[in-house]
Image: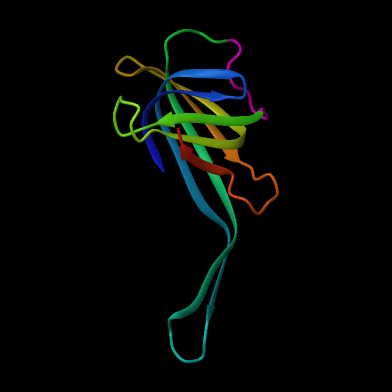
Amino acid sequence: MLVLNPSSVTFGSATWSNVTALVIERAAQKQVTEWSDNGPHAVLADVPEQVVKVRVVSEVVSGDPNGPSTGASGVLTATTGPNASDALRRVISIAAVVVGVSYELSQKKGAVRTVDLVAVSSDGASDPVSVTDA
């Protein structure tokens, strides 16, 4: 899932502003594939374990000594919609842990901060990402 320009997100009690992208990626952590004796094509594919990675990219307009730190956990929340109106707005909530914070500096882009997180499920079975109507 790619959310462009959600403007701001909250993580725990902190608000991160000037957000340019919120990226939610799902990947197989463990993959099972089986074949039969009847031919060369797989007859079963399953993903019993998966990881949900989240990336928040934002422009940095001023220094923040209290920025996100690795190991911090909380609920990441963003509100998004197809345009600037309140119609069809959705709230994305993700329980997550910060696993990395990096910065890029350039004359063209200015300062850009990327926060990488891993989503965590409350019980291991429920999806850590929820999307609800605003």
Residue stretch in magenta: 65-72
The colouring scheme, among rainbow, by chain, secondary structure or one colour, is: rainbow
Furthest-right residue in this view: 123
Q: Is residue 30 above or below residue 91?
A: below
Q: Position of residue 3 (x, y in %)?
A: 38, 35
Q: Look at the image and tell me in which quarter the N terminus lies.
A: top left
Residue at left offset 64%, top offset 30%: 74
Pick the residue in front: 76 or 109: 76
Q: Position of residue 34 (x, y in %)?
A: 54, 78
Residue at left offset 54%, top offset 35%: 93
Image quarter for residue 18?
Answer: top left
Secondary structure predominantly adopted by residues drawn in magenta: loop
Give the mark count.
0
Pick the residue in front: 89 or 105: 89
Furthest-bottom residue in this view: 38
Q: Look at the image and tell me in which quarter the C terminus lies.
A: top left
Image quarter for residue 33?
Answer: bottom right
Q: Is residue 119 above or below residue 79?
A: below
Residue at left offset 62%, top offset 24%: 12
Pick the residue in front: 133 or 110: 133
112 sits to left or right of 109: right
Q: Position of residue 57 (x, y in %)?
A: 44, 27
Image quarter for residue 101?
Answer: top right
Residue at left offset 51%, top offset 38%: 54
Q: Position of residue 133 (x, y in %)?
A: 45, 37
Q: Is residue 83 above or below residue 49?
A: above
- Is 66 in the magenta? yes
- Is 20 in the magenta? no
69 sits to left or right of 42: right
Pick the residue in front: 102 or 51: 51
132 sits to left or right of 49: left
